[in-house]
């Protein structure tokens, strides 16, 4: 039976494994779509509109917000970023899950949106703060200054852990991946996600009554 898609929110402090687990989740099920954000910042070399971001003028972006066409939005470093509602509604209506990479504030906005009944929110915790710092340092992507800023922000993210449906401690990547897949599989089977069950039960009822 056809099912309704999920809005999968995966959040964590930087370095807790969110990006890696997002990639693994989509490799496990390629039908899972990634929510492409809209932004008012100009495209960088090589970026494609509709693929990397939906590039919009500030006026267009604000109009989308006013009309309720954004599930969540924020103003970051002088530019607006947000998740357009239309593509997400289309995807979940087709039975496809949509993966969101947002912070706790974005997650809260999505949970309060008209699509809240389809939201599955998962937060990733590091096994320790020491390990979180080690991961940030070992990946070699950031300067010492940037790492310190990420560490300062990490507790603000962690402090909102209890606003999520599920919380996983990512001390073993493979084990956490298995847990993540189990959660998604179970949530897909929840009764509200299977609108076809009503018709199926009605057919069973008709069949039962005809057999009497």
Image: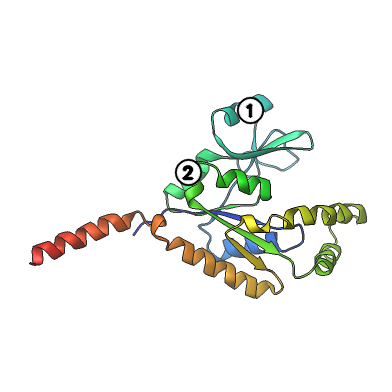
Percent x, y of residue 122: 61, 59
Name above or below for residue 153 compared with residue 112.
Answer: below
Looking at this rendering, what residue extends furthest in the right direction?
144
C-alpha separation, residue under disc 2 versus residue under disc 1: 20 Å
164 or 193: nearer the viewer: 164
Q: Horizontally, is 138 left or right of 86 in the view?
A: right
Percent x, y of residue 181: 55, 68
User: Which picture quadrant has residue 83?
Assistant: top right
Name above or below for residue 25 compared with residue 48.
Answer: below
Residue name at image x 78 percent, y 33 percent: 78
Question: Badge 1 is on which residue?
Answer: 62
114 or 82: nearer the viewer: 114
Question: Badge 2 is on which residue?
Answer: 89
Sooner in the amino-acid sequence: mark 2 or mark 1 = 1
SS at badge 2: helix
188 or 24: nearer the viewer: 188
Q: Horizontally, is 62 left or right of 79 in the view?
A: left
Residue name at image x 54 percent, y 32 percent: 68
């Amino acid at each position: 039976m056809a099912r309704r898609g999920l809005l999968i929110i995966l959040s964590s402090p930087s370095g807790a494994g969110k990006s890696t687990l997002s990639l693994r989740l989509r490799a496990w099920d390629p039908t899972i779509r990634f929510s492409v954000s809209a932004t008012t910042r100009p495209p960088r070399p090589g970026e494609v509109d509709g693929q990397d971001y939906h590039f919009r003028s500030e006026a267009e972006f604000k109009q989308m917000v006013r009309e309720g066409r954004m599930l969540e939005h924020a103003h970051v470093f002088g530019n607006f970023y947000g998740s357009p509602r239309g593509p997400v509604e289309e995807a979940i209506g087709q039975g496809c899950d949509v993966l969101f990479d947002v912070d706790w504030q974005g997650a809260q906005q999505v949970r309060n949106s008209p699509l809240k009944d389809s939201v599955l929110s998962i937060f990733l915790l590091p096994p320790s703060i020491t390990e979180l710092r080690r991961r940030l340092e070992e990946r070699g992507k950031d300067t010492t200054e940037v790492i310190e800023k990420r560490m300062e922000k990490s507790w603000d993210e962690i402090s909102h852990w209890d606003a999520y449906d599920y919380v996983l401690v990512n001390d073993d990547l493979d084990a956490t991946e298995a847990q993540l897949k189990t959660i998604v599989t179970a949530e897909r089977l929840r009764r509200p996600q299977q609108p076809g069950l009503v018709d199926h039960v009605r057919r069973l009822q008709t069949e039962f009554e005809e057999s009497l």
